[in-house]
Image (cartoon, rainbow, N blue to C red):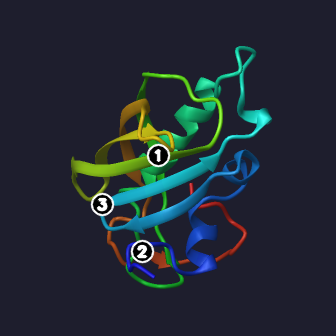
Amino acid sequence: MNPSQVDTPDTSQQALMGYHELLGMRVVEWQQDRAVVELTIEPKHLNRSGNVHGGVLASMLDSALSLAGLHCDVPGNIRRGMTLSLTTTFVGPARQGVLRATGTLRGGGQKTYMTSGEIVDEQGNLVAMGEGAFRRRSGSESSEGFPQSNPGEPAE
């Protein structure tokens, strides 16, 4: 397995829980400065026009962009953050298949960081793009993170 891919259930579980699981998002790559989240489109994701709802796309971008600045180098440790701002631009419709959101760290410091990214469909068509500003929570400034005290506690 490629080292940039999520290789343990614990890592993936700490990344996306609760709301993310409800939507069906999964982390397929996570490394320093980059995260990739996928979602298989289901009827529950569609709006009345038969396209993926914009809220689902914004949630995918929020997750991928946030995770791009929260990778942890120490197995079993975690880093946490919160969204300060998120700008989403919807470019094209998606109705079926798998969507892939990629987030890339663009800059920032120990606490606040900026990312950008995009969502593409299986054919590589651009569906949405976005950029965001995020804040690492106390203890998450270092890439070593901190021990996760409660395995059921969400990462974001």
**Which image quarter holds the C terminus?**
bottom right
Question: What residue occupies the far front of the structure in this picture?
Answer: 123
Task: Identify the image quadrant of the N terminus.
Answer: bottom left
> CA separation, marks 1 and 2?
24 Å
Count of numbered circles on the image: 3
Q: Which residue is mark 2?
A: 145
Q: Is residue 150 left or right of residue 115?
A: right
Q: Tell me which amino acid carries mark 1.
A: Ala
Tell me the residue at 57%/38% (across/down): 59
Asked where in the image residue 41 lies, by quadrant, the reply is top right
- Residue at (22%, 48%) from the top-left corner? 106
Mark 1 Cα shell of 10 Å, populated few (<14), some (14-19), many (≥20): many
Sequence order check, earlier mark of 2 and 3 = 3
In the image, 48 versus 112, the foreground residue is 48
Q: Can you identify the residue that label 1 sits on?
A: 101
Does label 3 or label 1 sit earlier along the sequence? 3
Q: Is residue 110 above or below residue 113?
A: below
> In the drawing, does residue 35 fall left or right of residue 93?
left
The correct choice, above or below, for 142 with respect to 99 in the image is: below
